[in-house]
Amino acid sequence: NWKNFVEVFNEYYHLPYVHPDSIDSVYDLPDEPDATTGAYASQFGATQGTGGLLENQQEHVLPAITSLTGRNRQGVRYTWTFPNMTFAAGTEAMWVYEVYPLEPNRTHVVLTACFPPETVERDGFEQSVQFYYDRLDAAIAEDIPALESQQIGLTSPFARQGRFSFLEPNVAEFACWYAERLGQNLDGAAS
């Protein structure tokens, strides 16, 4: 389900269970969510090293984006532009997921990895960037089986809605936004 895919990208609580040996130890607990207005949610989280690389490949880090200052040079900002685009802006790169529902249980995902021009023009960039692609591939390869199991679980007659964790405020914000849109559509249909 497209919503599940975007939700997983925007929450921290699955990291120790789905990514215990690939990226979990890179991420600290996230900051409080940003106060936002409109159709998006955003949250910053500090990292130990870079969120753009696997735990065991941190020595291959590319230079930080030169315009970043202060704490922004030490973590990743996860932002969800409702309903179906989410991105992570890290210290040296940004990756964007566009998520398109095809059917209730099928989703088409487009991933774009973005690097500053000065980084792309560096000698050895083509070799270095492969480590970033390895991280993206490894994380998604771990997420997909978990998402498939989640999809099966959601079809169970015993599935019940739970509470949101402090590790998923972007997901809670999306749920409120989405519910509001559904309510507007229902109100419009009833009048």
Image (tube, grey):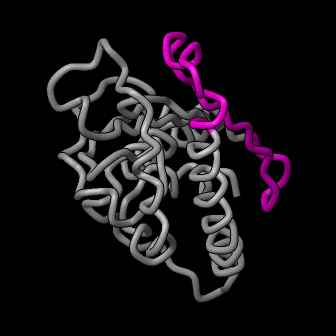
Tell me if I can see residue 83 in this picture. no
In percent of the image, x 54 and y 22: which residue is there?
115
Q: Name the residue at the front extreme.
A: 123
Quarter of the picture holding the C terminus: top right
- Residue 58 position, x and y percent, is 41, 51
Image quadrant in which you'd find residue 141: bottom right
Q: Name the residue at the left extreme.
A: 70
Q: Name the residue at the bottom extreme.
A: 158
In percent of the image, x 35 and y 26: which residue is there?
64
Q: Is residue 32 above or below residue 63?
A: below
Q: In the displayed structure, does residue 30 sit left or right of residue 180?
A: left
Q: Does the stretch in magenta take in 113?
A: yes
Tell me if I can see residue 169 in this picture. yes
Q: In the displayed structure, does residue 88 sit left or right of residue 70?
A: right
Q: Is residue 19 above or below residue 44?
A: below
- Residue 85 position, x and y percent, is 59, 33
Span colored in magenta: 100-129
Q: Is residue 144 above or below residue 39?
A: below
Q: Nearer the viewer, residue 183 or 124?
A: 124
In percent of the image, x 60 and y 41: which residue is there?
186
Image quadrant in which you'd find residue 159: bottom right
Q: Does the stretch in magenta take in 112?
A: yes
Quarter of the picture holding the N terminus: bottom right
Q: In the displayed structure, does residue 28 sit left or right of residue 105?
A: left
Q: Is residue 181 above or below residue 2?
A: above
The number of numbered discs placed on residues in the rendered structure image is: 0
Image quadrant in which you'd find residue 65: top left
- Residue 190 position, x and y percent, is 62, 38
- Residue 75 position, x and y percent, is 29, 40
Q: Nearer the viewer, residue 57 or 171?
A: 57
Q: Nearer the viewer, residue 190 or 169?
A: 169
In percent of the image, x 73 and y 37: which residue is there?
110
